[in-house]
Amino acid sequence: MYHGVDRVSATRDPHGMFVTPRAFRDQVEHLLEAGYVPIDEATYLSAATGTPVPRRSVLITFDDGYVGVGEHAAPVLASFGVPSVLYVPAGLVGGSSDWLPVRHRHPLMGAAELREVAADGMAIGAHGFDHADLTTLGDTDLDRHVVAARAELEQVVGRPVRSYAFPYGTHDARVRSAVRAAGYDAAFAVHDAAGPFATGRVDVNATDTLRSFRIKLHRLYPRLRHATNRFPLLRSKAHDLVGRAPREDCHPHEATGGGR
Ligand SMILES: [Zn+2]
């Protein structure tokens, strides 16, 4: 699970959601060299109904639809013929990540850009309407974030929208069944997995080195991540051992524009 792919300073991306274009290319090359088999959304969904998929299958996903994903990630993926899925908040197409504090917001792809990346091999999935936490919504709002979001995105990209990624990765039984009832074929969470309508994902972020990326590919990583969740200090120590990728302009007090 990626979010942005762009050169963004730590000041404008304190949570490390943006991977540099260079790191992204290295990671995709590593996947292919190490024998991983990137699959597309349709293959992923057919696996759920029993169709066998290759060993070491991997599904690459992006949340939010940042402009840099279209500019930097899509061309790399297209050049290697690697498919992916992009999860977009339907009400913010061509807008920005308004759910974040003003200085941490970044532009999101517009309709033309979404159609372009879709033509290049990115499936488009739903990521709510305006990125609200679904578990906090009443039934009418939930409907807008699940049912209307799908209709709207299908109109924008002119293709079926088949899967869903929960904003913030948060979900409960009610929102999982709303997504299932709306006709989606699958939904993704992050660390709190709960069946095919809340499948866990491994997050790749700005501080990942190729070394930590390789550790995250290990099939036991999600369980390890879960275990260390209860001991943040232990996770931090483990991260110290593996090393962190340097961030540009890591001085939160500097009032720089950043975010090229
Ligand atoms: Zn998101």
Image (spheres, rainbow, N blue to C red):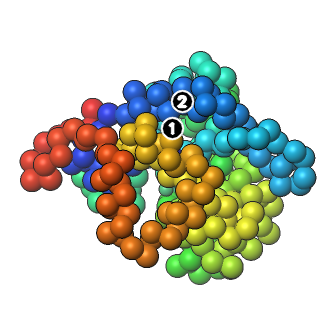
Give residue 110's mark: 1
Residue that extends furthest to the right in the rendered view of this protein: 50
Q: Which image quarter: residue 99?
A: bottom left
Give me the residue at 45% from left, 70% from top. Answer: 229
Q: Amino acid at mark 2?
A: His
Q: Which image quarter: residue 238?
A: bottom left
Give me the residue at 15% from left, 53% from top. Answer: 252
In the image: residue 150, left or right of residue 11: right
- Element under disc 2: helix
Q: Position of residue 60 (x, y in %)?
A: 61, 41
Name the residue carrying label 2: 30
Q: Amino acid at mark 1?
A: Gly
In the image: residue 95, left or right of residue 36: left
Q: Do the residues under discs 1 and 2 have CB atoms within 8 angstroms?
A: no
Q: Position of residue 207 (x, y in %)?
A: 34, 46
When the figure is inspected, residue 187 is found, relative to residue 84, above or below; the finding is below
Q: Callout 1: few (<14), some (14-19), or many (20+) C-alpha neighbours within 10 Å?
A: some
Residue 177 versus residue 90: which sits nearer the camera?
177
Mark toward the start of the polypeptide (1 vs 2): 2
Q: Position of residue 183 (x, y in %)?
A: 80, 61
Mark 1–mark 2 distance (CA, rounded to whole Å): 30 Å
Say which of marks 1 and 2 sits in front: 2
Q: Quadrant of the C terminus?
A: top left
Give me the residue at 36% from left, 48% from top. Answer: 242
Q: Position of residue 210 (x, y in %)?
A: 43, 36
